[in-house]
Amino acid sequence: MRPAKLLKLSMTLLFVLMTCAACQNNKEEGPGEYISLNELKSLSEKGVSLGWNDFSKYSFEDTGSGLYIRNYPVEGGHTLVITGKSLESPPENMYMFTRNGKELDFTQDNVSELFRFK
């Protein structure tokens, strides 16, 4: 093969590999497709003692880059978002988005409010 054709083939292959790497799915599948409202209520009762491991059995989408930002689907079309700098330390922030886009802190009272949207 001539060097020019070899260079073109190498560049094309490199481009395809880069495109495939960029399109990787960042979803982590757990046993459940979403967190039920009852499970969410139980989790909220743990308060500040909640850690990353409490959510290990749930599916999430990782949208962070340099920061852990995990989006957990919740029953009824809601989303729980958990953020932090490290999985070895407790999450720094936890909040929810209702299916209508309203942002709520992840507290027992606010989780109870999600039952109104059921």
Image (cartoon, grey):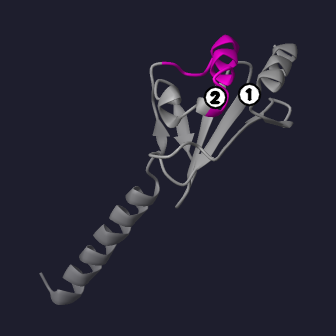
Percent from the top left, x then y, of residue 36?
A: 64, 15
Question: In the orientation shown, which residue stands out farthest toward the left?
Answer: 1
- For label 2, the residue is 73
- For label 1, the residue is 78
Picture residue at 55% right of the left edge, 42% below the top? 90
Q: Which residues are magenta?
A: 32-48
- 35 is within the stretch colored magenta: yes
Mark 1 burial class by Cα count in 10 Å: few <14, some 14-19, many 20+: many
In the image, is residue 110 above or below residue 27?
above
Picture residue at 82% right of the left edge, 26% below the top? 110
- 117 is within the stretch colored magenta: no
Q: Earlier in the sequence, mark 1 or mark 2?
A: 2
Q: Is mark 1 in CB contact (under 8 Å) with mark 2? A: yes
Picture residue at 45% right of the left edge, 30% below the top? 29
In the image, is residue 32 above or below residue 8?
above
Percent from the top left, x then y, of residue 33?
A: 55, 21
Quarter of the picture holding the N terminus: bottom left
**Left of 75 or right of it: where is 102?**
right
Classify mark 1: helix, strand or loop: strand
Picture residue at 51% right of the left edge, 36% below the top? 52
Q: Which mark is residue 63?
A: none
In this rendered view, identify the residue nearer to me: 88 or 99.
88
Look at label 1 and name its amino acid.
Answer: His
Classify mark 2: helix, strand or loop: strand
